[in-house]
Amino acid sequence: MLEILFYPIATVVLIFVLGSGLSLLVLPSHLKQYALWLTPWVLIIFLIFSLIIFSIFGIAVETNSPFIIIFLLCLITYVLFKTKLRYVFSFKQDVLLIFFVIVSITLNLSPLIRRHHFMTTVSMGNNDSIVYAASSDFLVHHSIRDNLFVNTQDYIGGLLVISYRWGTPIIESFFLNVFNLKGYQYTYVFETILYGLMIPLAYILLQIIYKKKSLLALVFLSLLLVFNANMLYMVYHDFVGQILFWGLGLSLLIFVYSYLDKPSLLITGINIYDIMIGLSLSALYMSYHEPVFFILAPLLIYVVFLFLLRKDVKNIIHGLMKVGLVSFLLSSSVIVTATANDFIQAFNGDPNAVIGWQLFRDSVPFANPVEMIGFSSIHNFPPMPVFFAAILSALVIGIIIYGFIRTKQKLLTFSYIVLIILFLVWLMNNFFAYNRALTYNLPLILILFTIGATEIIALNKKLLYFFAAVFIMVIVSGLLLNKRFLREHAIIDKNFISLQNLPSYIKHEAVYNEQDLNGSMPLWKLIWTSYFVYPEIIDDLPPKKLITNLYANSVPDNALTLIEKPTPWFVPTKVVFRKKVWENEYYVLGRLCNAKECLLNQADNLSNLEFSDFDYEDSLLLKGWSSKESGHRWVNSKEATFRLVAGKPVSNLKIEVVSLQKPQKMKVYANEVFIEEVPVDTSWNEYNIYIGYHEKEVINFRLEFSKLYNPKTLGLSADPRDLAADIRKISLE
Amino acid sequence: MIALSLLAFVLVGHGFSVLFLPSKLRSNTLLFAPWMGIVFIIYSGLALNLGRVAMNEELLVGRGFRGFQFIILLAIIATLYAAFYFKRKFFQFKKSHLLIFFFSLVILTLLQYIPIKKQMSIITSSNYLLEQTITDTLLKTHKVSNNDLLIGIPLVIAFLRSIYPFISIELLSQIANFYVRLIIYAGIFICSLIFLKEVVINNSIVIRGSELLFVIFMFALFSINIPLGIITLLLLLLYSIYQTYDKKSLLPLYKTGIIVLLLLLINPLYTGLLLHLYFP
C-alpha cells in the first residue's frame, strides 16, 4: 500500500528537483515568473528529446540516464551558486495549485488506493496500456535503434517502428530505470501524475491570455480540470499519449502566446523562443502527432486573418518560419512519417471506425457545451431534453464568448476557436472522432469558460453563489465517473503477475495458450499473458505451429500449454494433459494430450460429455462450437466436429440436442462415414444412433446441420450469434 | 538532360539560397542555387526515406501526394517566403552568371562523351528509391550496408526521374557518370569550405545562416562520400583548435561543438544508422 503513495511522491519530487536548474536557465525572461510550474514540462521536453537522440544513437536509457541526471544536477549547482535565478513563489496560488494537483492524482489513483493496494495498471476498457508498458520496459535496456535490427512483439514495434512515437515510452522508461520498476506497475501511475501536473499549466496559460491573476479563476479552472468527465474518461482509458499531449500542447501554447506577443523578438535571428517552441514541437511529433494539427493550423489561420485585416504579418511569418525550421531540422523524418500517417488517416480512414472505447450513451453521444464543460456527463447521464439542453448550452456558449472578449491576443485565440468549431461540426457523425477532437482542445475551452465566469462574477459578486452551486455538478459528474471506474475496470492482477515465476527453461520452447486452443481469451488477458510469458525480442522465440486438422486440437501433442485455473466467475479451458510442468494458484502449465495413444490412456474420462466441471470439454469438442456455457454448448456453424474415446466396446452414440427453430436436420458422420440423418426438434430430445462396433479407438464425429438460426432476428433474445443447435449430452454406449 | 537537371536544381535551391546565404555571398545567389538544390533534395529525400515515404510512392493510390511533391512544396514555400521577405533582392543576378552557366552546360555535356563504364549500382539504387525506403528494407532484413546509406546521388536521380517521368532512366543516369559525380562531390565540398570560411570569420556566438548551411552541406557530403565528410569535419576541428590557440578564446571551440551537435541532430535516424555501421 505504501508504494502507491511513495512512487507518485518520489516521481513528482524528482521531476521538480531535476528540472529546476534547467527551467530556470532556459526559460525566456518573460516566462521566468512561471518557472515553478513549467519546470516539470521543461524537463519532460528535454528528457524526451535527449533520451530519444541517445537511444537513436544506440545508447539505451539505463546507460544514458546517469549522464543526463549528472548533467541536470550540474545545472542545478550552477544556478544555485553562480546565478541569482530563483523561483518566484506566490504563496496562496502555489498552495492552491499543490492542493489541486494532489486531489487530482489521489482521485485518479483511487482504484489502486481503495481496492487493489499495489502498483499496477488499470483501464476502463481500452487496451493501449500494454503498448506503453511494454515499450517502456523495452527502452530501458534496448535502444530505439536496436529495434530496427531485431523483431519485437507487435505491441512494441507498432509504437517504436511503425509510427515513431517514442516520446511517451522513453520518458516512462527513464523513471522505470530510476525506480527499478516494470512498465505494468508504473504506466497508470505515471499517467495520473502527468495529468495532475498539467493543471497548473492551464492556469499559466489563463494568466497569459487573461493578463490577470485571479485565485477565483484558479479554483474554477482547477475544479473543471480535476473533475471534467470527458477528460477523466481519457485518463481512465489509459490514453497516455493524449495525456502527454495536453501537457506538451499547453506548454506550446504558453510559449506561442508569449512569443507572438513580442514583435521585437520575432525579427531577430534564432532565439530561445524559437528553440523552445521548435523543441516542444519536435517532442510532440515524437510522442503523439495526431493533435499537432490543432496547434499548428490555427497559426496559419491567424496569419490569414492578419493578412486580411491588413496588419503587419511579416514579423509573425518570420517567427513562424524560424520555429518551423528548427523543428523540421530536429525531427524531419518523424514529421514526414507523422504527416504521411495523418494524411492517410484523414483521407483513407474509415470515418465510422470505432476506437477502443465503449460508448456509454447510445442516443446523442456527442457532448453538448454543457457536457463539454462537465456540468453534465455523456458517460453518466441520459441526454438532456432538447429545449433544456439548448438553453443551457446557449448560456455556456455565452460565458465562453464573454471570456473570449475579456482576453488579450483575441485574434490568435479566435483562430483556435474557429478551427475547433469547424472540426466539431464536421465530425458530428462519428462519436469517437468528435470526442477526440473535443478532448484535445478542451483545456483551451475550459480556460475561456473560466475567464468568462470570473468576469461575470466580477460584475456581480452575488453570482459567485450561483457558480459555486453549479460547479458542484462538475464535481458530481467527475465523481460518478470515478465511481464507475472503481466498479468497472480491467486490471493487471496478481494472476498475470504470477506468470513472472514461470520456469526460465520454457523460453526455449513455444508456449501455447487458451487462445491457441479455442480462441476463448479476451484481448486483455491475451495481451497481458503475452507480456509476462513471452520475451520482448522474438527472434529466438520458437514459432508456434498450429494444427488445422478437423479432428484434433489446434495445439500439437505434447506442446507446453498454459491454462488458467477455475475461479468462481470464470469457466476455464478443460483439456487433458500428459503431465503438469508447473502450476500456481492461478495457472497450470502442462504438456497437452492430443495424440490418439495418449487419449486412449485416458479413455474412461473421454467417452462421454455432460458439459459439467469435470469433463475435458476442450479436448473433445473441436471445430464449430460456440463459447463455453455451463451444462450445454451451442453449435454456431453448419458443421461441428468432436471426438470421443472408446476404451471398452461401444456401438451407439447418444446425443441430446435441441434446435431454435424448425426445420432442422442433423447428419451424423463417424470417422467420415455417413451414419444417419435425424430431424432436430425445438424441444430437448435424446437420439440413440447406431455407429457400429468400436473398441480402443478414438472416434471422430462430424455433425452437419441444415440451417443456422439467429435468436436476435427471430426475436427470441438479444443474442446476435447464428446458431445451429444446442447440445447438452454426448456419450458412447 | 543536363540542362533540365540544372534547371530543376536552380528552381529548388534558389529560394533557400536567398534565405540562408550570408549577405556577403548573396550577390552570387544564382551560382549557389544549384548546389543548394542538390543538397536540399538530398537532405529532404533522406528525411522522407527514413520517414518511410519513397520518392515517387503514392501515399493514397489514385489520390496523389508523392514523396517528391513534399520536396517541391517545401521549395515553393521557401521561394515564396524569400520573394516576400527579400522582394527586389530575390532576383539579383549578374550577366557573368549566365556565362558561367552556359560554359558549365557545355563542359557537362562534353563529359558525357568520354567513354566510361556506367555505375549500375547507382542506377539500381535510384530505381529502388523511387518506390521503396531503406527503413522498410531494414525492417525486413535487419541489416544495413554502406550502399544502403550512401544514397545521396541516387536520391537526386530518383527526384529527377519523378519530376521528369518522360525521360528514360538511361538518360537520367548520365548524372551518375563518373565525371559528373566528381563535379557534384567537388561542388558540395567547395561550397562547404566557403561556408566554413564564413563560420570562422563570424565572431558572434549566435548561430546564423552560414553555420546552418555548413552543417547541411557537411551532412550531404556524409551521405554521398563519407571520406569527404570526414575531411570537412577534420578541417573544421583543426581550424577551430588553431583559432582557439591563436585568439586565446574558447569561442571557436564552442561554435565547433554546436556545429558538431547540429550535425548529429539534423537527421538523428540517419546519423544513428551511420554510427551503427561504423561503430556497431
Image (spheres, coloured by chain):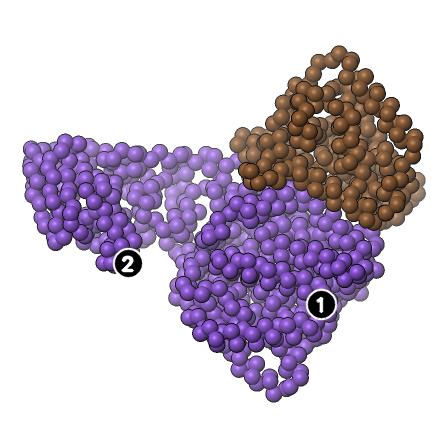
Residue occupied by mark 1: A410
**In percent of the image, x 74 and y 47: which residue is there?**
A325
Front-lying residue, A73 or A638: A638
Give residue A587's position: percent from left, percent from top.
32, 49
Front-lying residue, A585 or A183: A183
* Residue A540 seen from this side: yes
**In percent of the image, x 68 and y 77: which residue is there?**
A214
Give the chain letter for brown: B
Give residue B85's position: percent from left, percent from top.
83, 49
Q: Is residue A237 above or below residue A607?
A: below
**In percent of the image, x 48 and y 64: which residue is there?**
A366
Count the numbered circles shown.
Answer: 2
Q: Reading the chain from its start, which is encountered first: label 2 or label 1?
A: 1
**Left or right: A133, with A270 as reference point:** left
Among the 4 quarters of the image, the one containing residue B113: top right
Subunit that carries the residue with mark 1: A
Residues flagged by tags 2 and 1 on a common chain: yes
Residue occupied by mark 2: A718
Q: Residue furthest bottom?
A: A462
Task: Name the secondary structure under disc 2.
Answer: loop
Among the 4 quarters of the image, the one containing residue B58: top right
Give the chain letter for purple: A
The alpha-carbon separation of the residues under discs 2 and 1 comes to 53 Å
Among the 4 quarters of the image, the one containing residue A488: bottom left
Subunit that carries the residue with mark 2: A
Give residue A356's position: percent from left, percent from top.
45, 54
Q: Give the amino acid at mark 1.
A: Lys
Q: Give the amino acid at mark 2.
A: Ala
